[in-house]
Image (tube, coloured by chain):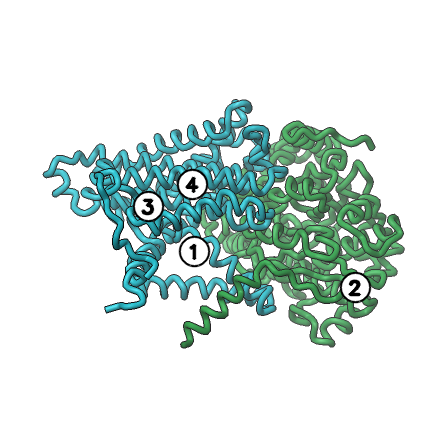
Amino acid sequence: MMFKRLTGALIGATLALPAVVSTASAYELVIPSLDYRTGPYAPNGIPFANGYHDYLMMLNERDGGIEGVKVKLVQCETAYNTKQGVECYEKTKDTPPSRALVYQPLSTGITYQIIPKASVDKIPVHSMGYGRTSAANGKVFEWIFNFPATYWDQAAVLVKYIGEKEGGMDKLKGKKIALVYHNSAYGKEPIRTLEKAAEKFGFELMLLAVDHPGQEQKATWLQIRRERPDWVLMWGWGVMNQVAIKEASSIRYPMDHFIGVWWSGSENDVLPAGDGAHGYLSGAFHAPGDNFPAHDDIKKHVYDKGKAQGERDRIGEVLYNRGLIAAVYASEAIRNAMKIHKTKEITPAMMRDGIESLDLTEARLKELGLPGFTIPVKITCANHAGPRKVALQQWDAKAKKWSFVTDYYDTMNDIVDPLIQEDSAQYAKENNIKPRDC
Amino acid sequence: MFYREAGQFKTSYIADQSILPIAQDRVFVFGFMAVAFLGVPWFIDSYWANAIFVPFLAYALAAIGLNLLTGYCGQVSLGTGGFMAVGAFATFKLITLFPDLNLIIVILLSGAITAAVGVLFGIPSLRIKGFYLAVATLAAQFFLVWLFNKVGWFFNYSPTGQITMPSVEMFGVLVTGPSASPAARYLFCLGFVVLFALAAKNIVRGRVGRSWMAIRDMDIAAELIGIRPLAAKLSAFAVSSFYIGMAGALYFGVWLGSAEPIEAFGVEQSFLVLFMIIIGGLGSILGSVLGAAFMTLMPIFLKNFMVDGLAVEVVTAKHVEITLMGVLIVFFLIVEPHGLARMWQILKEKLRLWPFPY
């Protein structure tokens, strides 16, 4: 009996599968959110997804959407797996009424996967500080954006910081810098930049790969203990971060000489190592903490109304804020697109124009309740990477807080720009793309 | 009532040996093929092609390949992911070195290259058996993935180690790359799977397949009746790897379009294909296809059912999906340890007696 009912329900579901649920007739802005709250990358995926969700829900609750048009957030679980990411992309891209306006998959692997697809489907992709670095060249990558800075900019800035600490770039000569990286497209991104920098400044680069999912790093850190590099950089994600920081503290590697990419610098990466993580550094492009007016609005309009997906005391974590700023970029680009095209019913193509002429000034950030939260961003047709500035933040294990220890550094254009030109030219050649004039 | 072969007489050996001796089966299979080839392409959209049919077909081909080796010849292999990687990287290298080569030839060549690699890693099977062989093939898995991740020549020195499939035309229609139409991708994969499933079915019915089964059932007895274990085992590795290599080529070339070795061809891949043939039925071509369908489509179906049908929260749905997949696998194996193919067979027998079972 039970089985019969179950089979009945399953058959019913099969029939219902292709049917699209259409509810309100009013126009809605579809924003797909490819999150991952399961698997080895969930510790990092969850706060980001919460921040993204909460900010857009706050707009819906407080302002009735963006310029009065509700946001329809379509969530899809990818588990940080490219195959599931493809399924999610295919599933969400044509969601009515507006189709998917922008993708922010928070995965370099999925970004690589959807770059060619989205360019054909004419849907913009904003891989915010991840994905394919050469997408910075808007002449070739018409639909792909990666502002506010790329991996290569970040690698360059980290070298700059090390040079500063050593007392000048010329002091880098003969130093040994190790890169501990996730053995995937993501982790390999900075290698070429670091190799160029090593050539230019004469330091020795040591490459140490960590395989997915990154729980096994004993051998890596044994090697670091033996070779004693002067500095260690890390391109890690998910549980790999926590394990690396714990291993580093257990071999007593000086934490203030251990710098993570901005994807390796959030609370859940350092907390498991306890006091051992004190002094650990990471890249950053926005402030940590929940002391901004926008956070108060989120608490009031989302958490107090019981519409939140996360926990209240985790608002303001680094990755929560990163999800929030991603949602800010998306919503501001939508506003911009509405202004340009003088309609509230925008399409993905209009959204692209909105992102391409996005100009998020400090004054506007203040209006949004985020004064001094991040650097102003101005996107142009040729430059899809924006300001390309990176700061460093440091972990204080006693206060359990991240805080900025430097100002925003500029990238090293002499190293990074030729690499971007070279890689984007190769992509254009492989895919028969004629670079746009701009 | 409807499914009964009474009155169907076979008057020749050819008729007696046909794959589908019962007329109703023939009608069903040909009807099914007609729908698959002529009906589906009209309705298929990019979601159905890229998320459902193409991955299913690629995995079905891989499962057939592994079933030839494990189900028919009894050699347990955990190297499937690695062999799929060989097929994918061979396709990538061939298509970038010879852009004008026909894609079908490229995929066949990739299969042949994988077959050679498979034979190489099959050599230990002459000395070691069972679980020990599984460990030896596991070494192949890790070695191959490491190789493709390490040596720049294989991925044309791309900075991220990713390989990307260029857009390739067949008879004026794009079948790979982002602009390829869903129907073209689907038909291309379907053609390969149907053709090679038929070939596999015939191989296992013939002398070669029988020698594999003899080795599987008892290798000493097989040797005594004159089957050479060397030839039988290595041919099983070769044919199996040929299939898996082609599956890897379709998986990378037609479905994903770009891949990085560790994630796309990791050990999870090997286990997934092994589970497919265990659930589908060891030693059955139909079972491979059913198993592939179960393992690739069931999670997507469960997810869509829960998220769209029942409006469950996405993350809860994911957790339930993982649990439910496990439960279903255990359930099916308890109900029928010989897999879905055996279930299908029982169903057919019941149908023959229906509506008067005794």
Q: CA distance from mark 2 to mark 3?
A: 53 Å
Q: Which mark is residue A26?
A: 2
Name which residue type carries label 4: Val
Task: Quickly name the residue at label 1.
Answer: B294
* Real-space Cα separation, disc 2 to disc 4, in angstroms: 45 Å
Which x, y percent locates residue A50?
67, 63
Q: Chain of mark 4?
A: B
Q: Are marks 2 and 3 in contact (CB under 8 Å)?
A: no
* B332 sits to left or right of A34: left
How many labels were placed on the picture?
4
Mark 4 and mark 1 lie on one chain; the one further toward the N terminus is 4
What colour has chain B?
cyan
Mark 1–mark 2 CB contact (< 8 Å): no
- Please, what is the three-letter code of the amino acid marked with disc 1? Phe
Q: Chain letter for mark 2, please.
A: A
Q: Chain of mark 1?
A: B
Q: Secondary structure at mark 1?
A: helix
Q: Position of residue B189 (x, y in %)?
A: 48, 40
Q: What is the distance, in whole Å, between disc 4 and disc 1 at their CAs?
A: 17 Å
